Image (cartoon, rainbow, N blue to C red):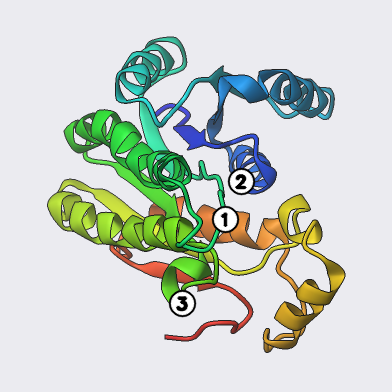
Amino acid sequence: MGERVALVSGGTGALGRVICDRLSKDGLKVVANCHPSDGDGARAWQRLLAAEGTEVALYPFDVADHETARVEIDRIQEEVGPIDVLVNAAGITRDAPIIKMTPAEWSAVLRTNLDSLYNTTHYVIPGMVERRFGRVVNISSVNGQRGQFGQANYAAAKAGVHGFTMAVAREVARKGVTVNTVSPGYIRSPLVMAVPEEVRNRILEQIPVGRFGEPDEIARAVSFLVADSAAYITGADLSVNGGYHMA
């Protein structure tokens, strides 16, 4: 068997970059996806990785667009190789209380955070089933489990992520393909660190381990689930939140 190929949607975001680096170190051939508007920054990151000896292929396209996803996934599989591992990490926020949330803010988050899972998985799963091996990991959020003020759109999308995971996991379980969710808590990232310090401190007080998570702790959870040895784990939601939410 040749080198396995992993596609990470949202692969140039704060979590996506670390996931790409981790999977590359695990010996996978990694393809990072980003939105075309992030292309310049993504290419700079790609060059930095290359200088450190880590090769990651970069394919900017909008995973929220179904036809674009089909075209670009076909191109990846022709140019890089069949996709054995899919990590759906693309995500955005458009926070507002529900009485102020606009239809555009609702739709943008649902399209990017939930529709994209269908768009990528729909075109990757058939090859996995045919080869009788595949790993899909969908990145959800603790706020999809417990809700959060001002995030009706985000919480709905992220809750939907695990429903999608469980359904697809049942469909392909006998075909050598596993589908799982990783639900991060509050991770030390530019998004979290941009929250006012007073608010961050209130959140920190509610985390039993007493700190924010590190991006690599999420990447290692993904790494664990995509390994050959994780073949008996499917339809699971792995919470990595420092005890912030327990279910």
Q: Residues within 10 Å of mark 2 (few under 14, many from 20)?
A: many
What secondary structure is marked by label 2?
helix
**Mark 2 or mark 3: which comes first in sequence?**
2
Where is residue 7 shown, x and y percent of the image?
47, 32
Alpha carbon distance from label 2 to label 3:
24 Å
Q: Which residue is mark 1?
A: 95
Residue type pointed to by label 3: Arg
Q: Earlier in the sequence, mark 3 or mark 1?
A: 1
Position of the N terminus by quadrant:
top left
Residue 88 image offset from top left, x and y in percent = 44, 43
Residue 37 place in picture, x, y as percent: 62, 21
At a point 57% along the width and 55% down the height, the residue shown is 95
Within 10 Å of disc 1 (Cα), the crowding (few <14, some 14-19, many 20+) is some
Q: Residue furthest front?
A: 99
Q: What secondary structure is marked by label 1?
A: loop
Contact (CB < 8 A) between labels 1 and 2? no
